[in-house]
Structures are given as C-alpha cells and as structure tokens.
Image: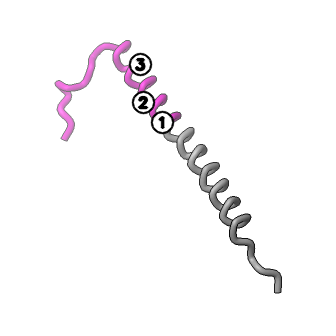
Amino acid sequence: MLDAANFPDDIAALKAMRIAAQAREDRKYERIERLEKLVAAFNQAASVANPVPIR
C-alpha cells in the first residue's frame, strides 16, 4: 500500500514529477519508432540479400 507520508506535498514538485514522467514516456515511443525503422531496414536488406525465387 502507498504511504501518504512519501508523497510530495508541493505542487511544483508534483508538476516536475509529471513532466519527468511524460518525458520518459515520450522517449519510449521515440525508441519504439527507431526500432521499427531498424527492423524494416533489416527486413529489406534480408530480402535483397536472399530474394524469393519466382515460380
């Protein structure tokens, strides 16, 4: 259970915590986008290196 004594009681501290949490979330989504682009590039390179034969 959360202990209320550990919560900051300063509005500025709460706002700073919220801003920091939002920045972390934004970085997560940016990293996901970079990884998706990297996977697409690997897939493209793999298909060029090993083309599927035409039947």
Q: Considering only vertical position in the picture, is 47 above or below 38?
A: below
Q: Is residue 48 left or right of residue 6?
A: right
Residue 15: say if magenta. Answer: yes
Front tag of 3 and 1: 1
Left or right of 55, for residue 24:
left
Q: Residue at x 63, y 57 (%)?
A: 42
Q: Looking at the rendered structure, which numbered label has been put on residue 38?
A: none
**Residues at discs 3 and 1 in contact (Cβ within 8 Å):** no
Identify the residue at horizontal 34%, vertical 16% (top origin).
Answer: 13
Quadrant including the N terminus:
top left
Q: Nearer the viewer, residue 4 or 51?
A: 51
Q: Secondary structure at mark 2?
A: helix
Q: Which residue is mark 3?
A: 15
- Crowding at dot 2, Cα within 10 Å, few <14 / some 14-19 / many 20+, comes out as few
Q: Say what secondary structure mark 1 lies in.
A: helix
The amino acid at mark 3 is Lys
- Residue, disc 2: 21
Instruction: Kindly report which numbered mark, 3 or 2, lies closer to the viewer in this rendering.
Output: 2
Kind of residue sitting beneath label 1: Glu
Q: Are marks 3 and 2 in contact (CB under 8 Å)?
A: no
Confirm or deny contact between disc 2 and disc 1 (CB under 8 A).
Answer: yes
In the picture of the structure, the residue carrying the numbered disc 1 is 25
User: Quadrant location of residue 43?
Assistant: bottom right
> From which residue to which does the magenta span run?
1-27
Q: CA distance from mark 3 to mark 1?
A: 15 Å
Q: Quadrant of residue 29?
A: top right
Choose between 35 and 21: the one closer to the eye.
35
**Quarter occupied by the C terminus:** bottom right
Specify which label sits upstream in the sequence, 3 or 2. Answer: 3
Q: CA distance from mark 3 to mark 2?
A: 10 Å
* Few, some or many residues within 10 Å of mark 3 (<14, 14–19, 20+): few
